[in-house]
Amino acid sequence: MRKYLLYFFMVTSLISCNQNDNRPGNIPIKESKEEKVVNKDSIDKVRLEEEYESKKPEISYQQIVLKDRKHRNQIIHEHDEDPNDMSKNRAFCLLNRKARRYMRVGDTVVVPNIYSENLTVYSLFPQYYHGAKNIKKLIVVSNRYLCYGAYEYGKLVHFAACNTGKEKTPTYPGRYSLVWKKKEHLSSLDSSWVMPFNWNFHQYAGCAFHQFSMPGYAASHSCVRQFKEDAEWLYYWGEKAKLNKQRTEYEHLSGTPVIVLDVFDYTRPKTGPWIALKSNKAHIIELPEKPMEVEDAIIPYSQIPDGAKGRLPNKERYIHGEDTLRARGIIREGVVLTKSVNFNVMKRKKKAAEERERKRLEEEKIKELEKTAETNGMGEEYFEEVQGLKKVLTKPDSIKNQ
């Protein structure tokens, strides 16, 4: 009752004020140009958002539990890749955020009642982003919902599934930008990791968009994994950063902007909230009003490869990064981050150690043979064997391995 009385008095007061302002002798209060611009912009925002969303057909989702192997195979077969119509397969994998081979008996999968070639109709991001209306190109990533959207002057042009960083090597929220790209990149940390359509978006931490396996949960080493079709699309769509005057470093945040919005829910590590959605209009992710004012991503010093640490600008920010992220609740209590490890260096060191051990054993064998020959007065053929071993031992590795 108090609430209604308070509301009544507020409305009465406002009416009274307006009446007093319009009485003869009172100076009318004019709306400033700035206020008019703000009001018009707000009206345009609502109008355009509603206009674009209304064009999106409503698609309902069904949650199906894969009861047994036969049932699982039936659902998978219904969504086979068809060269003449990929919409069924692509929509199914997009909605489940995973490749079909990772779908197991007992899993819940999402099946839509309409399959569309235009995958933006399944988007959790708004079809129109007013805050990006003056930005040529922009990428927004949701860790929580494992998806990203690409915008051109505020209009959504692409929507895709992604699998981002696991809890000990997460993809941190904040602002980034595309830096450089390579069609087939071998990881600088482990050359056995082949990353097609690679788009680096942090030149020091090595974070990148690229094609890789899609198990349907946060599984990467801070990168943004994608299906092949999406990785290829982004590879040709994005714009790289500019080099500085000395052409030694890329200018900070000069490529296509990338905004990582939120944090994956690691309390349910193998799934996420997208599985429970009942339709393509059930939830729309809220985007920052001013994307270009989003804070630069904070990345802990331990997550920077050793080879890049000497080039870090504002190194203190990285050194205190982990404490900042823990204070903000982005890194959960008790979680120990995995230090960036260069597996290529480890492999080279291991190979070098193995080679040293091989040489040591061969040298011991030569000494033993020489001692035996000397003790027993053996013939020249025995000494030839020793000389042969010595030659092998002194050959470069590249010749020995031919």
Image: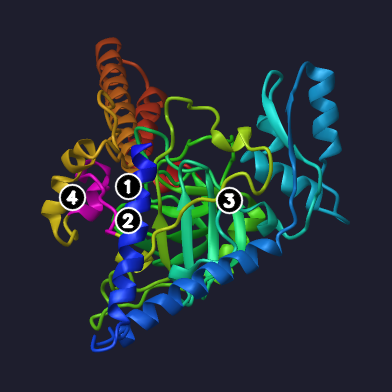
Q: In what quadrant of the picture does the N terminus appear?
A: top left
Q: Amino acid at mark 4?
A: Tyr
The furthest residue to the front: 24
Q: Of helix, strand and loop, which one carries label 2?
A: helix
Labelled pair 3, 2 in contact (Cβ < 8 Å):
no
**Label 3 amino acid?**
Leu
Query: How far is disc 4 from disc 1 in space, using C-alphas?
Result: 51 Å
Find out whether the residues at labels 1 and 2 contact each other: C-beta distance under 8 Å: yes
Amino acid type at image mark 2: Met
Q: Quadrant of residue 18?
A: bottom left
**From mark 3 to mark 1, how far is it between C-alphas?**
39 Å
| Residue in view at x 33 percent, y 38 percent | 2
**Contact? badges 3 and 1 (CB < 8 Å):** no
Secondary structure at numbered mark 3:
loop
Q: Against 364, is 8 above or below?
A: below
- Mark 2 vs mark 4, foreground winner is 2
Q: Which residues are magenta?
A: 295-309
Which label is found at residue 247? none
Q: Position of residue 122 (x, y in %)?
A: 67, 51
Residue depicted at 24% across the width and 55% down the height: 308
Label 1 belongs to which residue? 6
Q: Amino acid at mark 1?
A: Leu
Mark pair 4, 3: CA separation: 32 Å
Mark 3 and mark 2: span between their CA atoms?
38 Å
Please identify, in this view, whether the residue under mark 3 or under mark 2 is nearer the observer.
2
Left-right relation of 213 to 256? right
Label 2: which residue? 10
Q: Which residue is rendered at x = 56% and y = 64% of the image?
A: 234
Tell me the crowding category of disc 1: few under 14, some 14 to 19, or many 20 or more residues within 10 angstroms, Cα based: few
Residue beneath disc 3: 124
Q: Are marks 4 and 3 in contact (CB under 8 Å)?
A: no
